[in-house]
Image (tube, rainbow, N blue to C red):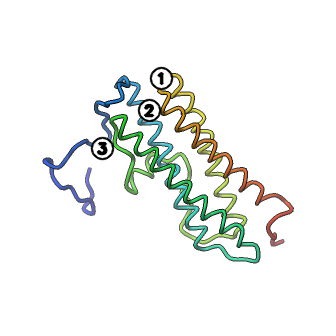
Amino acid sequence: MSAPHLRNPGEDALRREWGTVGGNDLRIDPAAAERLVEALNADLAGLYILFNQVRKHYWTLEGAEVGPVVEFLEGAADRLAEMTDDLAIRVHALGGVPVNGPMGFRQHTPIGIEAGDVYSLRDSLANDLEGYATLAAQMREHVELAAELGDEATLELVRGHLRTVEVDAHDVEKMLADDTLVRRD
């Protein structure tokens, strides 16, 4: 189903069709590769949605205590972008097509997409923390899946990024502690 805003350069240009998993040079069983591509695309979609949310918060935060938060969000967005690149490259190496485009991200993300409105600093960070927590839980499952399927490279890739997600989540959690950030009562 192609919407009028999508451009299709034609069948001659097509290398790999979306939603399919072809062969791979990694010698990973095709059925295992298909399961890994599905899992990594879900992680990739979630990370990309969280990246966009974190960037939105970076652009729109206001308040007396925004300085250190903006600095954190800038770094967090960079880390999220790096993780999405790494996972997309791995999906391609496994013979899949990395999730892409607004519809693809929406269909595969495990996290809720925050409305386009601007929210308070505390509420914005709480939404970020929810996204990080959801992704961490899902990525733990995908570490187990990669181990079960015997794909050591995917296991290490996801495990390393899981650590980053957990560290950033912990930093957001510290920012939301009762003795931080001004509360409006």
Mark 3 is surrounded, within 10 Å at the Cα level, by few (under 14), some (14 to 19) or many (20 or more) other residues, namely few
Which disc, if any, is residue 164?
none
19 vs 101: above or below:
above
Q: Do the residues labelled 2 and 1 touch (CB within 8 Å)?
A: yes
Q: Quadrant of residue 159?
A: top right
Q: Mark 1 points at which residue?
A: 149
Q: Which of marks 2 and 1 is nearer the N terminus?
A: 2
For the residue pair 8 and 87, the one nearer the viewer reads as 87
- Residue ID at (18%, 55%): 9
Looking at numbered disc 3 in the image, what kind of residue is underneath it? Trp
| Disc 2 and disc 3 in contact, CB within 8 angstroms | no
Residue identifier under label 3: 18
Residue at 67% in and 45% down: 166
Q: Name the residue under label 2.
A: 36
Tag 3 secondary structure:
loop
Image quadrant containing the C terminus: bottom right
